């Protein structure tokens, strides 16, 4: 028997009705969180987890959860006195115009990643090169392990560097995975990059006047499904 899609039977009705989106929840206490919620880095699983404001504040306390969870700070910094020239960028050997670096506390070294259609891709460059290019900057000296990153972008012969929350970098990775088309990403992806970095520049404060971890706007929700160690989740 042919069954019309308009047939009103209990068995088919569930396929005809859109399922409501499931609210995001704090992964520690299970309370529903707002869209613009905080994140924690689970240092054992090397993953970002959603958190409500009270749990995020709790995990900022020394010794909380034996150090397993670290709250992602909400500060955005820039160093107007630090500039990367063409030779410095060329030494980094990044195949695209965007990259981010963070210090992996477990490995005790900088990890460099860049967005790609496959997600966050780790640079195979020797850590010593990254240290030589960026290790002397004030932003690098302020970088909190696991939870903050140095976000780099090269455009029109110049390279901008900002210290940002690590979840923001994975939000960028998620956007690029969704929008990337063709070899160079396409016009939509480039426009999204311009808008993204304009927002970062608006939030950023000069390093001389902003050393607190609470400077800047709040963290954003993660869209990438990627882990902070650079591996792409299935």
Image (spheres, helix red, strand yellow):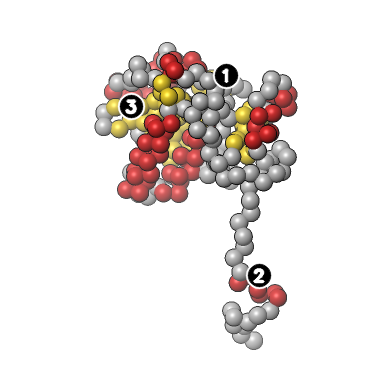
Residue at far top of view: 136
Contact, mark 1 vs mark 2 (Cβ under 8 Å): no
**Residue appearing at x 42%, y 28% in the figure:** 204
Q: Earlier in the sequence, mark 1 or mark 2?
A: 2
- Residue 184, given in percent of the width and then of the height, sits at 33, 44
| Figure check: 88 above or below 166 | above
In the rendering, at what x and y percent does residue 197 appear? 38, 35
Q: Position of residue 226 (x, y in %)?
A: 55, 40
Q: Write the residue at 72% across / 21% down.
A: 63
- Name the residue tied to disc 3: 159
Label number found at residue 14? 2
Disc 1: CA contacts within 10 A as few (<14), some (14-19) or many (>=20): few
Left or right, 45 with reference to 193: right
Which marked residue is nearer to the observer: mark 1 or mark 2?
Answer: 2
Corner quadrant of residue 147: top right
Instruction: Indicate the quadrant containing the N terminus: top left, top right, bottom left or bottom right.
Output: bottom right
Where 2 sits versus 150, above or below? below
| Among numbered discs 2 and 3, the one appearing first in the sequence | 2
Please give left or right for residue 95 compared with residue 148 in the image. left
For the residue pair 125 and 181, the one nearer the viewer reads as: 181
Q: Residue at x 54, y 25 (%)?
A: 214
Q: Earlier in the sequence, mark 1 or mark 3?
A: 1
In the foreground, 50 or 229: 50
Residue at the spot of label 1? 108
Q: Is residue 13 above or below residue 163?
A: below
Asked if residue 108 is positioned above or below residue 39 in the image, the reply reads above
What x and y, as percent, mark residue 111?
50, 26
Label 1 – label 3 distance at C-alpha? 26 Å
Asked whether, in this view, residue 151 is left or right of residue 89, the answer is right
Q: Secondary structure at mark 1?
A: loop
Q: Quadrant of residue 64?
A: top right
Q: What separation in Å lies between label 2 and label 3 (alpha carbons)? A: 52 Å
């Amino acid at each position: 028997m042919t069954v019309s899609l308009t047939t009103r039977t209990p068995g088919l009705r569930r396929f005809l009705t859109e399922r409501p989106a499931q609210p995001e929840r704090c992964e520690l206490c299970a309370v529903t969180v707002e869209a613009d919620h905080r994140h924690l880095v689970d240092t054992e699983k090397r993953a970002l987890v959603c958190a409500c404001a009270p749990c995020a504040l709790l995990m900022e306390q020394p010794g909380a959860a034996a150090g397993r969870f670290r709250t992602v700070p909400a500060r955005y910094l820039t160093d107007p006195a630090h500039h990367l020239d063409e030779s410095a960028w060329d030494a980094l050997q990044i195949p695209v115009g965007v990259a981010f670096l963070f210090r992996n506390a477990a490995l005790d070294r900088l990890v460099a990643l860049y967005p790609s259609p496959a997600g966050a891709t780790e640079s195979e460059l020797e850590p010593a090169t990254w240290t030589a290019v960026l290790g002397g900057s004030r932003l690098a000296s302020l970088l909190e392990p696991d939870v903050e990153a140095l976000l780099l972008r090269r455009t029109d012969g110049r390279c901008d560097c900002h210290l940002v929350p690590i979840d923001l970098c994975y939000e960028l990775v998620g956007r690029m995975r969704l929008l990337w088309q063709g070899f160079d990403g396409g016009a939509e992806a480039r426009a999204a990059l311009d808008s993204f970095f304009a927002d970062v520049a608006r939030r950023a404060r000069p390093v001389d006047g902003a050393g607190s971890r609470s400077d800047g706007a709040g963290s954003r929700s993660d869209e990438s499904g990627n882990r902070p160690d650079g591996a792409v989740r299935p």
